[in-house]
Image (cartoon, grey):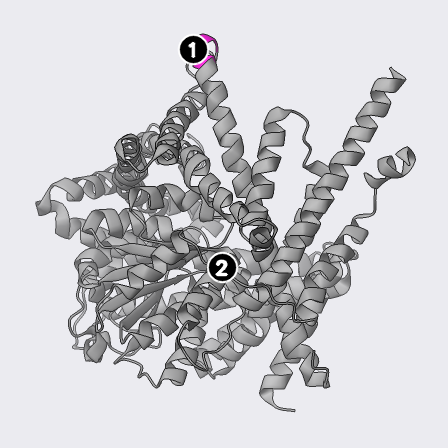
Amino acid sequence: MNWTVIGIWLGALLSLSLYSFLYKDNPFYKFAEHLFVGMSAGYWVIYNIKNVLIPNWWNNLVPAEGGMQPIWLIPGALAFFMLLRIVPKLSSLSRMSLSLIVGTGAGLSMTAMLQTNALAQVNGTIIALGQGGGLLSWISNIIIVTGVVCGLVYFFFSKAHTGVVGGAANVGITVLMVAFGASFGYTVMARISLLIGQTQFLLFEWLPTMGINL
Amino acid sequence: MRLVIPLAITFVAGMIMILQFFVPATQSVGESLQEWYMIVASAAIFLGAINLLNVHVHKIRFKAPNWKYSPVTIAGFSVMIITGIFFGIEPGKPFDYMFTQMMVPMGATMFSLLAFFVASAAFRAFRASNWRATLLLLSAFIVMLGRVPIGGMISPKIPLISEWIMQVPNLAGQRAVMIGAAMGMVATSLRMIFGIERSYLGGAD
Amino acid sequence: MSTFVEKLGSIDRRIIFIVMALAVILPLAFRMSLPIKIGEGPSKDMYDAVEALPNGSTVLLSFDYDPSTMPELQPMAIAMAQQLMTKDIKIVSLALWPMGVSLGNEALISVSDSLGKEEYLDWVNLGYKTGGGVLIVRMGSDIKSVFPVDYDGNSVDEMPIMDNINKLSDFDMIISLSAGDPGIPSWVMMAGDRYDIPIGGGCTAVSAPQFYPYLGTGQLVGLLGGLKGAADYETMVRVGVEDAPAGTATPGMAAQSVAHLVIMLFIILGNISYLAGKKKKRGAK
């Protein structure tokens, strides 16, 4: 018995405990589930201390070369205010921390979203029509342009979906259905891939520790 | 009044982030703010951890349903913290060992359970009830076949049609969703920066 | 017959679970193997984009995932590291997800050991930071202010690999292995479009369809989608390499094929049962 084998057994037993949920909810599943939640939280906290708070806050507040940079007390205080959310009398202070996060995030993502997910996409759609490459390519480009425009019409609820708008919205929902079908296909693929990964672990790492080599 | 300072912080932080995109003079203030953001955002993790412990201590104290499992959560949390602080986090140390041998298989298994539920859901809920649902189903079938080797063995055209679906109708649909969501995001961001949207502050008192 | 078909609809879900489990276990246990054919597409584009990088380039590899999506993304990480290190391309890695640090280490150390590469000279793992997109923007002007030390507390200033790396535009390419947000969208928005750096990536199959618009505009140079993308990449990286490790994605594709067929069968049976029930209701009226 060495640490690797013990580790494989630990992983396998915990995996089987979680899979037991497929039969019905039971104490083994609950044990593994609770353990996973606790360990994950511990992992996150440690990485936040060692990879964020110490190098990016503490070492800036109290640099190795000596002295203190009081400006770094501000983010420290705001971080502390965030924790005060659990103290009912002082919880309103946490709003300041939330405001900094929301304001920074909103300001940054607004310009980025507009550029990357709106303007660049509109630009890409217009270019698509002009790209050559045969009949299929031309038809594809038409479908892309029509699909994007009609898809947007479908999401536009300020005007009733009747007449021309209704027709465009119908084309839009049809294109969206094909896209959602593709997404469903990919979702199935993803879920099965995860099962394959764990099955490979049990078949090719755990079973060999008992002398069963498939 | 209690909302004025938070709203002012949101406005100033948001405007600095927008301005630094266009006005180089605001660059350094923006950079400081970004570094502060990291520190403050990391506090959310601690808040979550404290909350988790709080819930489980509460469950143990009041013997709430399933309270017997709460010590497991607390023990798991404590062991990771203790090993991380006293032995380090580099490969080969107890912290990394527990991550690799316990957390990795548990995390992977937890989500692999979804394979079973997606199969069950597909059987029970995926109905060709009208022509659009049939189109969705057809698209899903072609993509499912086209993305695995067996699809190409049935017909070499299936992977090609699957890739075409991804690059044409899927792209069009996803792009429409993307542009729509981006416009919504821009509007919401502006509402937040200008203090019209305040729900993130927990009510409008 | 009609009663049997109708009863299908109320079948115990555990029977479905058993069939599903067998669809995955049997092809793996019997080492069923199906050939992976690589056509034109995002996987090939990703491989070609990396191949086009000159030897000695530096790439930023971001591990933006956790164990829940490891079966899909870890084989990509290993194959990607193999290709980059074989081409003598330096890898600076980081993680926007905390657990990505350890998973990234696992992949980098295994490949680095097999190819005789050195930490801090050929590759480094800078570790994790909170902030997602905000942190990326800050890295655009100064990486070392965000990452003064690596994941283990070693000073970045003393690492030879970081000698000429000060900001994001010093990288020849950024590759994100992404399980969600923050991940590929953050890199495209905050690095690709803002600082004009080529972005490539790998993602879970769930999120792959939503990144096709980025491929259409060239905002992404290539994309590996799910286990299929990983298997494609493993296959391409192994071409012409003797004794290359097998990887886990390629052997999984046979099981993936069978499982897809089983799910499709379930959907067909479910619909037959639904139509039979509908017909009976209509008859009763």
**Image position of A209 (left or right of C3):** left
By secondary structure, the bulk of the magenta-drawn segment is best described as helix
Which is more foreground, mark 1 or mark 2?
2
Does residue B42 appear in this view?
no
Q: Which residue is mark 1?
A: A164
Residue B198 x, y percent position in the rendering: 38, 32
- The residue at 32%/83% (across/down) is C117
To which chain does the residue with label 1 belong?
A: A
> Could you classify mark 2 by the number of other residues whose Cα lies within 10 Å: few (under 14), some (14-19), or many (20 or more)?
some
Q: Is residue C173 above or below residue C162?
A: above
Residue C195 is situated, as x and y percent measured from the top left of the image, at 19, 51
Residue C173 lies in the magenta stretch: no
- Between B166 and C183, the residue placed more toward the observer is B166
Nearer-the-camera pick, B182 or C153: B182
Closer-to-camera residue (A214/B92): A214
The span picked out in magenta is A162-166
Task: Identify the residue at image location x=51%, y=67%.
Answer: A42
Report helix, strand or loop for mark 2: loop
Q: Is residue A163 magenta?
A: yes
Quadrant in which the N terminus of chain B appears? top left
> Going by the image, does A208 lie left or right of B84?
right
- Residue receiving disc 2: C37
Residue appearing at x 39%, y 75% in the figure: C240
Query: Badge 1: few (under 14), some or many (20 or more) residues near its Cα, within 10 Å?
Result: few
Q: Secondary structure at mark 1?
A: helix
Q: Percent position (x, y) of residue C135?
A: 29, 56
Q: Amino acid at mark 1?
A: Val
Q: Give the percent coordinates (x, y) of residue B61.
A: 68, 60
* Residue drawn at (30%, 84%) of the image: C118
Task: State how far apart marks 1 and 2 are (Cα).
Answer: 45 Å
